[in-house]
Amino acid sequence: MEHITVAGHPEPIPASPVAVSLLQQRLEVVREKRGEEAADALEVLVGKRIGTLLADGMPSVDLATMRSVVDFVETPEEEDSASGLGRALRGVKEKLEQRGGPR
């Protein structure tokens, strides 16, 4: 287990060597394709997300965790563009599903 420092998280993070390598590779690819600023922003997002995972009780970061973090941390949250009626209908459908009703 290695300990790495990542922007966005103040303390060293325990991570497997393969996870560290994946993060370094991804940051380098982003740096080459989108520039230094984008790589720095990605590193901050990764550090914040890993910090959240560690605070929630994860003891260290393995390859699968690092892959999911670096692959999806930049994915924007989907905005709910449904109208008031659409959200209401979705709520009714969810309640029906919870109660075993028709789908």
Image (tube, rainbow, N blue to C red):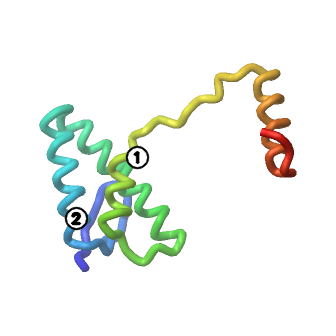
In the image, is 100 to the left or to the right of 34? right
Q: Quadrant of the N terminus?
A: bottom left
Q: CA distance from mark 1 to mark 2?
A: 16 Å
From what the image shows, is residue 93 above or below residue 69? above
The answer to which quarter of the image holds residue 20 is bottom left
Q: Which residue is mark 1?
A: 73
Q: Amino acid at mark 1?
A: Val
Crowding at dot 2, Cα within 10 Å, few <14 / some 14-19 / many 20+, comes out as many
What residue lies at 65% left-to-right and 23% top-to-bottom? 81
Q: Residue furthest front?
A: 102
Crowding at dot 1, Cα within 10 Å, few <14 / some 14-19 / many 20+, comes out as some
Please state which of residues 51 and 62 is positioned toward the viewer in this rendering: 62
What residue lies at 20% left-to-right and 32% top-to-bottom? 34
What residue lies at 41% left-to-right and 61% top-to-bottom? 50
Helix, strand or loop at label 1? It is loop
Please state which of residues 66 and 43 is positioned toward the viewer in this rendering: 66
Helix, strand or loop at label 2? It is helix
Q: Which residue is mark 2?
A: 20
Q: Position of residue 67 (x, y in %)?
A: 32, 56
Q: Amino acid at mark 2?
A: Val
In the image, is 57 to the left or to the right of 69? right
Q: Position of residue 86 (x, y in %)?
A: 77, 24
The answer to which quarter of the image holds residue 89 is top right
Q: Position of residue 75 (x, y in %)?
A: 43, 38
In the image, is 31 to the left or to the right of 90? left
Q: Position of residue 95 (x, y in %)?
A: 84, 44
Tell me which label, 1 or 2, sits earlier in the chain.
Answer: 2
